[in-house]
Amino acid sequence: MRRSFKVATVFTGTAALAGGFGPTALAATAQPAAVHPDYTAKECGANNDGVSHWVHLYYPNDDHPAECLGGKTTNHAVNATVASFCPGNNYGHFSGSVNGIKYADVGFNASSPRGPIYGYQEFHITQITISGDRGVATCT
């Protein structure tokens, strides 16, 4: 099964980061982080390299490593279907949908535990804002 994670920035317009991650990609070396002017997106792996406090997006069936986002970002486009979410020490909001039902401004707070979004097994995130961070909360 192939999953994709896409992020577009205000600075790149229509250009977007697209990283295809799946079980076969894990046999290779870890993919480099995509660094943008205001945040970084990368595969979390085993939470090495100081990413345990970043926002974590966990995929259905845990069939490949979580995707991590670090740093402030405002209304960035995301294309990720996730099973659960952990904010780490970050706060902000995201938008997305489940079965065609749209949810806007779903808030998250630092120190909230990992969990499904509104109890759904799969939630499609389309946009995220990370307003800042506080405290020392981490994701596992």
Image (spheres, helix red, strand yellow):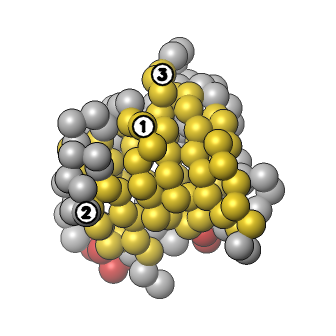
Q: Which residue is mark 3?
A: 133
Of pointers 2 and 1, the one earlier in the residue sequence: 2
Of pointers 2 and 3, the one earlier in the residue sequence: 2
Does the residue at mark 1 contact the one at mark 3 (Cβ under 8 Å)?
no
The local secondary structure at tag 3 comes to strand
One can see residue 7 in this view: yes
Q: Nearer the viewer, residue 52 or 85?
A: 85
How many other residues sit within 10 Å of disc 1, few (<14), some (14-19) or many (≥20)? Answer: some
Of pointers 1 and 3, the one earlier in the residue sequence: 1
- Could you tell me which quadrant the C terminus lies in? top right
> Please, is residue 5 above or below residue 54 in the view?
below
Q: Position of residue 29 (x, y in %)?
A: 20, 63
Q: Position of residue 20 (x, y in %)?
A: 32, 72
Q: What is the distance, in whole Å, between disc 2 and disc 1 at their CAs?
A: 16 Å
Q: What is the distance, in whole Å, between disc 2 and disc 3 at their CAs?
A: 28 Å
Q: Residue furthest right?
A: 119
> Please, is residue 25 above or below residue 1 in the view?
above
Q: Which residue is mark 2?
A: 14
Q: What is the distance, in whole Å, between disc 1 and disc 3 at their CAs?
A: 14 Å
> Mark 1 is on which residue type?
Thr
Q: Residue sitting at 39 percent across and 36 percent down?
A: 73
Q: Residue sitting at 25 percent across and 63 percent down?
A: 14
Q: Residue furthest bottom?
A: 1
> Mark 3 is on which residue type?
Asp
The local secondary structure at tag 2 comes to loop
